[in-house]
Image: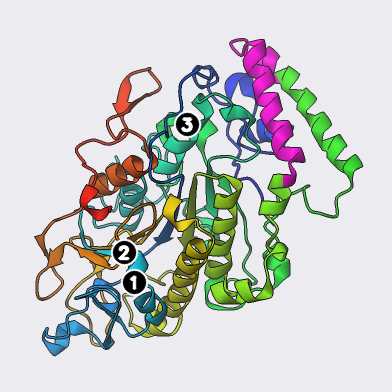
């Protein structure tokens, strides 16, 4: 069941955020500090972009470069790893034997082999990759998101959409996160991992976030076929069987915005009505109902993606993009405390992680291409770090943010290419390093957003969305 992520926090004059969200059934109504409630009549900030949308596949924990897209068959035996390389459709690109689907579809993507940063920490690295800015908390100093975090790229896209003409009347948000907030399925959800939220930009620009449960504390739905009852992906109260009368009762909740008007005197009548329209559009939209219904997909398509949680979430991402969502993040989360963070050994990488990622990612690229969507959808797949070149005795590898890979496809990306060169041990960058700042600038540029754009912070000071990065234009044809 899909629900909108909301946590009890107090807003203006004692109203809890949960109360505000309940008024419209969603956290997408832009209700935050009064400074963020005014919609500016600006032009389209996305005009001229090659990408109409972005699908960001975030492999949290850090896949090994030596077991994925930067194999070193000539390296010493204690470095090169247990997996054999296979040829791909990209000249000079050897891919893991456990990524056969992506090897067959490498003509659709560019393999960037020189991602690098020095924030060798999962939470901080995840924040860095999703925002393009270093986390304000030092390495090892924290695990969870804070209001002082930098806004995610998706939140910046949501902000710009809301400030555009008609942005508040869209029946879908511009930013969504699937299948859960990052960290929710690990250790009873005690880690609210940073990076996907709006941070200092304001909670109004947080993503629409779905919610999927585990069957038990030891269950990993990423590694097994999921039942349809687990994958309904419906907003609570909007399931197909809900009668129209129930929807009308739900719409009546919008009247509670009158209370908000009294509590927030800076909310003028015109802006208030625009928020009300946005809530009504989401609640009653046939577009919303259809997009969140995986049952409308053929059995063959669902099988192609894989019935596991990552596969079905990638399929849902494609559906959301079709419905007009501009930025969709799909998390491959850590359920067992390790997953892609493969300290112990490479067994899970071999038997679970690589096969499910390979099936879902290759199906997504084929599906987007077959539907004519790949030309206008930028697909990014990566973790927040790589793994140490020197393994332990069972082929487990530690954290290594100095070098790791990323895959980019669609929206004009030249498929069948590689970018950057690492050394003979997949340890360091030899040529063409790519920082998180460069990645963010590239994604914004592909969307048509000026990477030099500045947004107002809580004191209305202009803060650049990217500081020091540059788009990698050579990736594009």
* Magenta residues, dominant SS class: helix
Q: Is residue 460 magenta?
A: no
- Picture disc at residue 159: 3
Q: Is residue 405 left or right of residue 426?
A: right
Q: Are marks 1 and 2 in contact (CB under 8 Å)?
A: yes
Q: Earlier in the sequence, mark 1 or mark 2?
A: 1
Between 330 and 333, which is closer to the camera in this rendering?
Answer: 330
Secondary structure, mark 1, is helix
**Who is closer to the viewer here, 380 or 179?**
380
Query: Is residue 259 depicted above or below 326 in this figure?
Result: above
Image quarter of residue 214: bottom right
Where is mark 1, residue-wise?
106
Which numbered disc flags the more N-terminal residue, 3 or 1? 1
Q: Single out the mark in the foreground, 3 or 1.
A: 1
User: In the picture, residue 389 is in which quadrant?
Assistant: bottom left
The part of the chain drawn in magenta is 260-286
- The structure residue drawn at horizontal position 53% and vertical position 20%, both measured from the top left corner, is 39
Residue sitting at 79 percent across and 24 percent down?
A: 255
């Amino acid at each position: 069941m899909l629900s909108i992520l909301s946590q009890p926090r107090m807003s203006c004059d004692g109203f809890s955020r949960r109360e505000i969200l309940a008024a419209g059934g969603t956290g997408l109504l832009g209700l935050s500090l009064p400074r963020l409630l005014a919609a500016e009549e600006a032009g389209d900030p996305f005009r001229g972009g090659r990408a109409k949308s972005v699908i960001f596949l975030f492999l949290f924990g850090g896949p090994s470069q030596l077991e994925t897209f930067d194999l070193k068959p000539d390296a010493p035996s204690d470095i090169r790893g247990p997996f054999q390389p296979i040829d791909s459709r990209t000249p000079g690109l050897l891919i893991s034997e456990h990524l056969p689907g992506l090897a067959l579809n490498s003509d659709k993507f560019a393999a960037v082999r020189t991602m690098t940063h020095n924030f060798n920490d999962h939470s901080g690295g995840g924040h860095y990759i999703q925002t393009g800015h270093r986390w304000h908390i030092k390495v090892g100093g924290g695990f969870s998101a804070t209001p002082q975090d930098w806004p995610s790229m998706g939140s910046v896209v949501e902000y710009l959409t809301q400030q555009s003409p008609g942005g508040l009347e869209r029946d879908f948000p511009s930013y969504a996160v699937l299948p859960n907030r990052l960290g929710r399925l690990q250790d009873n959800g005690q880690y609210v991992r940073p990076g996907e939220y709006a941070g200092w930009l304001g909670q109004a620009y947080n993503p629409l976030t779905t919610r999927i449960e585990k069957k038990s504390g030891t269950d990993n739905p990423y590694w097994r076929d999921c039942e349809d009852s687990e994958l309904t992906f419906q907003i609570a109260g909007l399931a197909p069987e809900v009668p129209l009368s129930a929807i009308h009762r739900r719409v009546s909740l919008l009247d509670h915005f009158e209370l908000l008007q009294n509590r927030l005197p800076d909310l003028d009548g015109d802006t208030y009505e625009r928020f009300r329209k946005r809530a009504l559009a989401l609640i009653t939209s046939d577009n919303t109902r259809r997009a969140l219904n995986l049952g409308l997909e053929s059995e063959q398509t669902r099988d192609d993606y894989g019935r596991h949680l990552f596969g079905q979430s990638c399929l849902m991402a494609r559906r959301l993009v079709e419905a007009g969502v501009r930025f969709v993040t799909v998390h491959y989360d850590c359920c067992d405390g390790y997953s892609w963070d493969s300290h112990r050994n490479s067994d899970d990488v071999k038997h679970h992680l690589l096969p499910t990622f390979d099936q879902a990612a290759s199906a997504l690229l084929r599906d987007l291409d077959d539907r004519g969507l790949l030309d206008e959808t930028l697909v990014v797949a990566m973790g927040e770090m790589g793994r140490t070149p020197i393994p332990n005795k069972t082929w487990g590898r530690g954290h290594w943010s100095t070098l790791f890979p990323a895959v980019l496809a669609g929206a004009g990306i030249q498929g069948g290419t590689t970018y950057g060169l690492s050394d003979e041990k997949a340890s360091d960058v030899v040529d063409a390093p790519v920082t998180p700042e460069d990645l963010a600038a590239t994604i914004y540029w592909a969307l048509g957003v000026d990477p030099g754009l500045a947004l107002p912070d809580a004191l209305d000071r202009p803060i650049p969305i990217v500081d020091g990065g540059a788009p990698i234009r050579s990736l594009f044809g």
